[in-house]
Image: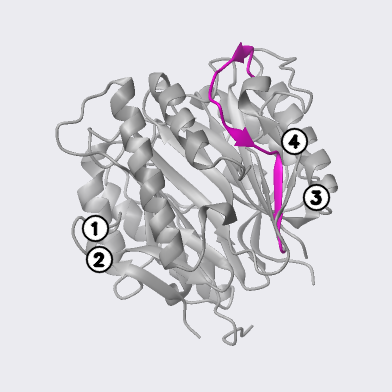
Amino acid sequence: MAHLRLRKFNTRDVYEGGRIANDMCMVVRAGNFIFLRGQTGFTLDHKFVGKGDAAAQADQAMKNVKVLLDEAGAKMEHICKITTYITDRAYREPVYAVVGRHLKGVFPCGTGLIVNGLATPDMLVEIDIEAVIPEGEASR
Amino acid sequence: MTHDRLRRGGSPGPELGANGCMIVRAGDAIFVAGQTGAGAGMGRGAEDAATQADRVLLNLKSLLEEAGSSLGDICKLTVYIDDRAHRIPVYRTIGRHLRGVHPVSTGLIVRGFSRPEILFALDIAVVSQRGARHRRLRKYHSDATRYGNEWQPLDCEFCMAVIAGKHVFLRGQTGQTLEDRLLVRGDAHAQAAQAMQNVRVLLAEAGASIADICRIVLYVTDRAFLVPAREAVLEGLEGTPCAMSEIVVKGLASTELLMEVDVFAMKA
């Protein structure tokens, strides 16, 4: 069966200055595996929240994660791995407090990196999520 | 059935502290927390980087064994260092521990980690080999290949693609051709176009196609390269909508490489 690709959007509507109009998507479900687009302070309607506030951006990102997983037939409890990119070590504490609150009781593995930047200068945090729907729980 | 989550919380804990764990076993797929090996009194020299890498690989060996797996199940490495100077000591240590495994690899220089004394972190993607062994295509030894225009004595055994059941993992692709030539310098769009050309060839050799790609991570070494590199990646995706992340890093395997793209595919 072909992979499920949810919440497609056209790059022309999201990126400034690009000349290419292509589709991307927010979620790919391949069998039981769920791949999410890196989540940031952008809402799922492409509005940016939390300018200058890493915790608020992380909160928005995690709210998106919950919605996207749900739409793909998965739950927060299915998250296996979270990679957290921040642009300054000072954001670690506020971001991890927010992420930890959203992941209460899930216990995923994590990787934390400080990088030079994200897609736009306003983005202070990006969260990548990998989830797997356990065998026998697959519901669509 | 729920996933097995081993070594939850604890101190010194995994990346997410009380909310995290070290290993998640989800069927045949094994997810591992990013591993670091900094200890008290360590500095920033080559020996310190090698010591950190040595600890990481020893820890991974025991963590994987706890999860009923082994280093031989590793499909992909993502190697993070915070200074290009750590590259050779870190890779030589990795190469020694993973002799004969031939994973695919992506190497990134980032700004830093959770604590300043950490010089290196390693992410691994692992799939248990039950019955059929993983297929590893286009195996190579690092010292017989070029990184940009340089020869680097990393002494690692890698490959270009790993097929693990339905999963296909590729080496992070750059502007270098599959014949190891960097034909385009200073042009992020052209380098990304070459990378996507390589992706198409490697996926075909792995029995997959562009339409099987699920996730893309695009790394660039300067934000100015993001738009041209992204456009070439999107052109290369031939209309397949993927879940994409974009990260600006401090550097890649050589200073001539302006972008690298990681591709995760699953056969439908």
Is residue B78 visible in the rendered structure shown here?
yes
Q: Quadrant of residue A124?
A: top left
Tell me which chain the residue with mark 2 is part of: B
How much space separates mark 4 and mark 3, taking CA atoms? 15 Å
Check chain identity for marks 4 and 3: say if they share one.
Answer: yes
Magenta stretch? B146-165
Q: Dot 1, how many residues are within 10 Å of its Cα: few (below 14), some (14-19), or many (20+)?
A: some
Q: Look at 31% across and 24% down and name the residue there.
A: B47
Q: Look at 50% across and 50% down and name the residue there.
A: B124
The percent position of residue B59, horizontal first and vertical second, equals: 36, 51
Checking the image for residue B13, the label placed there is 1
**Badge 3 vs badge 1, beta-carbon distance below 8 Å:** no
Which callout, 3 or 1, points at the residue further toward the start of the chain? 1
**Badge 2 vs badge 4, beta-carbon distance below 8 Å:** no
- A47 vs B107: above or below: below
Check chain identity for marks 3 and 2: say if they share one.
Answer: yes
**Badge 1 vs badge 2, beta-carbon distance below 8 Å:** yes
Checking the image for residue B206, the label placed there is 3
The percent position of residue B228, horizontal first and vertical second, equals: 65, 27
Is residue A114 visible in the rendered structure shown here?
no
